Image (cartoon, rainbow, N blue to C red):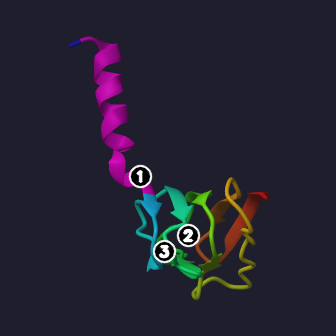
Amino acid sequence: MSLQSYQNRVHDEQLGDSFFVTKTASCTLKPYEKFVNLDSSGGSTALTFNLPPVAEMCGEMIVLYVTGYDGAITIAAADSVDFSAPTFDGADDGALLYSDGVHWWTLAVRT
């Protein structure tokens, strides 16, 4: 096995399907779900997505991207100090969030 094919295999294992998910119903995100497509176009009028525990995600980032929008999308983080949730009001909105272990920080927002 060549070094390149080994690196590709390791990369594929590290960025498996569980890292990239689409959510169409209210839920709590898992710590391994790092790239999350949010879709409220399934008939729900409002969806709430809870971020994973901030302490468990220390040093990690989560990318949220709205793929379909028909109703309000709320991002919640009950255990984060002074969390200010990004506001999504249409498809193609998104945010990059970072956990320092105490706070969820919104690093970038696209609306």
Q: On the image, which quarter does residue 2 sit in?
A: top left
Relative to 60, residue 100 above or below: below
Q: Residue 51 carries which label?
A: none
Q: Residues within 10 Å of mark 2 (few under 14, many from 20)?
A: many
Q: What residue type is labelled 3?
A: Pro
Q: How far apart are marks 1 and 2 (CA)?
A: 20 Å
Q: Which amino acid does label 1 sit on?
A: Phe
Q: Which of marks 2 and 3 is nearer the N terminus?
A: 2
Relative to 66, residue 83 above or below: below
In this figure, which residue is indicated by the disc labeled 2?
A: 40
Q: Earlier in the sequence, mark 1 or mark 2?
A: 1
In the displayed image of the protein, which residue is found farthest to the left?
Answer: 1
**Which residue is drawn at the image coordinates 74% and 68% (left, top)?**
89
In the displayed image of the protein, which residue is found farthest to the front?
Answer: 43
Q: Which mark is residue 52?
A: 3
In this figure, which residue is indicated by the disc labeled 1?
A: 19
Region of the chain picked out in magenta, as a range: 2-21
Tell us which disc is closer to us: 1 or 2: 2
**Which residue is drawn at the image coordinates 35% and 25% (left, top)?**
8
**Which residue is drawn at the image coordinates 30% and 40% (left, top)?**
13
Q: Which amino acid does label 2 sit on?
A: Ser
